[in-house]
Image (cartoon, rainbow, N blue to C red):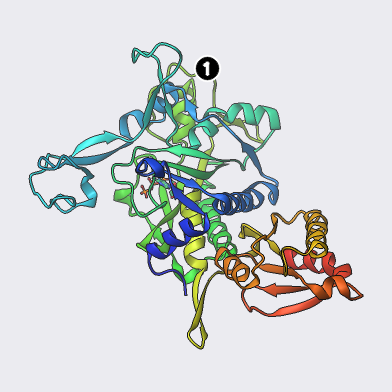
Amino acid sequence: MAATSMDQLVSLCKRRGFIFQNADIYGGLQGVYDYGPLGVELKNNLKAAWWRAIVYERDDVEGLDAAILTNRAVLHYSGHEDTFSDPMVDCKKCKGRFRADHINGKCPNCGSTDLTEPRPFNLMFKTAIGPVDDGSVFGYLRPETAQAIFTQFKNVVDSTSRKLPFGIAQIGKSFRNEITPRNFIFRVREFEQAELEYFVMPGEDEEWHERWKEARIAWWEAQGLKRENMNIYTTPKEDLAHYAKACYDIEYQFPHGMEELEGIANRTDYDLGNHTKAQDELNLTSHCHENHESTQKLCILTDDNKWVVPFVIEPSMGVDRGVLAVMTEAYTEEDLGGGNSRIVLKLKKHLAPIKIAIIPLKKNNEQIMSKCHELKKELMKLGIGRVALENTGNIGKAYRRHDEIGTPLCLTVDFETIEQQPETVTLRDRDTMEQIRIKTAELKTYLRDYFME
Ligand code: ATP
């Protein structure tokens, strides 16, 4: 059974060091969170799994790591300056500000119905660039990672000689001044996205849109999400963003409801069309912003020597929402009988923040401790991720902690290890709680197989 309330997760995240409220000691900064010692590992593992599936396992995708600070022109021509806004209302009584589509004509804070008319509110963070802060020179913190992929399209194509279809992938921070951040890390003002822009021949876009939808669902399943906890929402034509031809949302059953985890949009030739020069010569199908500033033609030569502006399919996932989803799914409260219970985080092995906890049966025994250090050094060579030396010295507490943080294996060094030959240690499995005794000489092969499968 997965987590049923956000409180269960918030509490676990704070207690064990996954996620903390940002600036907690000063009362917090709303809609901003920090990842703690275990959260940073989990998030890195999720990003690595995405990068591996999208870039390394395919032969048609290149990576990019572009800047967060964004030239105003980029977000002008992308359409964000004009349209990246939510209609919002102000409560005249308590001065609260809310998204018009999130309330029912009534202030959620004080209950007043004395509200302003909905007005657009731009979600981008504007920032002064350079030493003069008179408002004349400014840029933005990017509200999505995608735009740099479009503005670097030509540099990537020229430097890699790519032909269609091919993609450019990027993981990085995005910033949106959300009016009502809420539901823990679900809707925040600073978050991370993993985005792929997959460029295809116009006409092949619908087929690729379907393929990417299937590939992304399969990937989420490989991260541990059950298919029955996901829903595919097809945006009705009348609700589509003006540039999109079609859009699927992969939704997940979060503790607060079934909500968007990843969007997969068919963005046609809108983005490259917006940023290209010589728009008139390119047979664009989208209604783009007129652009006389761009210095490059953003098109590609096909095999039959025609210049074409590709269509783009965009699978775009929120990394923070991904972390929340895999934690929700993995969270389990187990009744062990006899009035005992435990919390166990049944994360997939590749996502677990700590892969193996090495636990000394007795902390103040020199021989046991030195064996623990030696084993840690040896096992790190496997390259499986973090192998941690647990220093609590209380085996029961150590097991409980590692169950809660999702460590797949606990390895215990006891007196038998140092006193008997052949040398052995115990391995305890997180999910079954079963323990086996294994020769240290066989340990590396065993663990390599265990973590590779
Ligand atoms: P929503 O409708 O929930 O505001 P969106 O449709 O505006 O999201 P996109 O612009 O499609 O979101 O961004 C792609 C992905 O980025 C989303 O599926 C989501 O996982 C993530 N994302 C967007 N906004 C936020 C946010 N404020 N906090 C955390 N993740 C976000």
Residue 116 position by quadrant: top left
Seen in the picture, residue 453 relative to 79 is either above or below; the reply is below
Q: Quadrant of the C terminus?
A: bottom right
Residue most extreme to the left:
114
Seen in the picture, residue 290 relative to 399 is either above or below; the reply is above
Residue most extreme to the bottom:
338
Residue occupying image coordinates x 68% and y 80%: 434
Report the front residue among 151 and 336.
Answer: 336
Report the front residue among 121 and 84.
Answer: 121
Q: Where is residue 202 in the image (x, y as percent from the top left)?
A: 52, 41
Residue 388 position by quadrant: bottom right
Mark 1 nearby-residue class (10 Å; few <14, some 14–19, many ≥20): few
Identify the residue under disc 1. Answer: 295
Residue most extreme to the right:
421
Q: In this view, does 244 lie to the left or right of 87?
A: right
Residue most extreme to the front:
364
Query: In this view of the protein, can residue 4 be seen by the observer?
Result: yes
Q: Position of residue 430 (x, y in %)?
A: 63, 72
Q: In this view, does 388 lie to the left or right of 36?
A: right
Report the front residue among 181 and 240.
Answer: 181
Q: Does the residue labelled 1 lie within 8 Å of ligand 1?
A: no
User: What is the count of numbered marks?
Assistant: 1
Residue occupying image coordinates x 34% and y 15%: 135
Query: In this view of the protein, can residue 251 be seen by the observer?
Result: no
Seen in the picture, residue 373 relative to 72 is either above or below; the reply is below
Q: Is residue 120 left or right of residue 18?
A: left
Q: Residue type at mark 1?
A: Thr
Q: Position of residue 238 (x, y in %)?
A: 29, 49
Seen in the picture, residue 397 relative to 176 is either above or below; the reply is below
Q: Is mark 1 on a helix, strand or loop?
A: loop
Q: Where is residue 436 in the image (x, y as percent from the top left)?
A: 76, 78
